[in-house]
Image: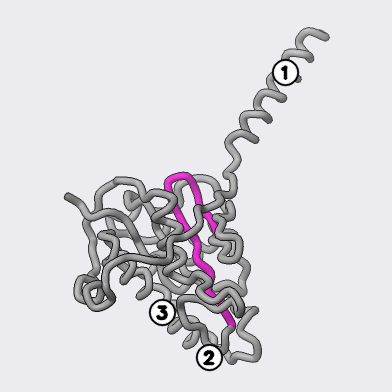
Amino acid sequence: MQTTIKRLAGVLVLAAGVGMAQELADVKLPEPKTEGGKPLMQALKQRQSTREYGTQAIAPQMLSDLLWAAHGISRAESGKRTAPSAKNWQEMEVYVLTAEGAYLHDVKANTLKAVAKGDLRKLTGKQEFVPLVPVNLVYVADTTKMLKATPEESAFYSATDTAFISQNVYLFCASEGLATVVRMPSDKPALAAALKLPDTAKITLAQSIGWPKK
């Protein structure tokens, strides 16, 4: 009997250890490179939406540079970003969905904060390429930061602030040879539940990023 109990205890300890090993961990990104790239006019000329992607991964350095271009801190003294924000609310948050799991981009720490383990990319859209693209960004408005905004103002400003960020991503991708397209998530409630969003957080848009299909 004691031998059986010890075996069961050993199995439980082993299972717990495996579970802990499989926990999704935060990812500290490399310091973003904020110089270089194609001239602005050339990037504008080459900006386009793409719906055919390869499966090559996006390197951590490239992802760090991409997220800085999207909404990173460009003025350390004031904390202001590369993208405009109505009334400087800075209500927009960027979630990064990969094959490993979902992360929230912590702008100040330049870290991907673990949110949910597992591949949730398919929840961001119905198109065939969506689950295969290395990175899908999900833009979320934290409406608690939009002080004294009416529902109409909240919807309007979160939409415009999302557009600023997504265009930054478009221009970065054009500069670096990446492919991208913005999309409306097909099932916002399911995606919100998977990302563990509170009712005050509103999904506005999704954007796929990868390498062009060769």
Secondary structure mostly seen in magenta is strand
> In x, y percent, where is residue 156?
47, 88
Residue mark closest to the camera, 1 vs 3: 3
Residue for point 35% across, 46% down = 57
Is 211 above or below relative to 92?
above
Q: Nearer the viewer, residue 197 or 62?
A: 62
Q: Nearer the viewer, mark 2 or mark 3?
A: 3
Name the foreground residue: 179 vs 24: 179
Q: Which residue is mark 1?
A: 10
The residue lying at 72 percent from left, 24 percent from top is: 13
Q: Say if the magenta span includes residue 200.
A: no
Furthest residue in direction front, as rendered: 35
- Closer-to-camera residue (123/46): 46
Mark 1 Cα within 10 Å, few/some/many (few <14, many 20+)?
few
**Tally of numbered discs:** 3
Identify residue for label 3.
164
Q: Is residue 15 left or right of residue 167?
A: right
Q: Visible in this render: residue 193? A: no
Q: Name the outermost residue toward the left.
A: 214
Give the residue type at disc 2.
Answer: Glu
**Amino acid, disc 1:** Gly
**Magenta stretch in the rendered image:** 89-104
Locate the N terminus and report the quarter of the image it occupies.
top right
Residue 153 numbered tag: 2
User: Which percent across, then down, holds residue 2?
Assistant: 82, 9
Residue 100 is a magenta residue? yes
CA–CA distance between discs 1 and 2?
57 Å
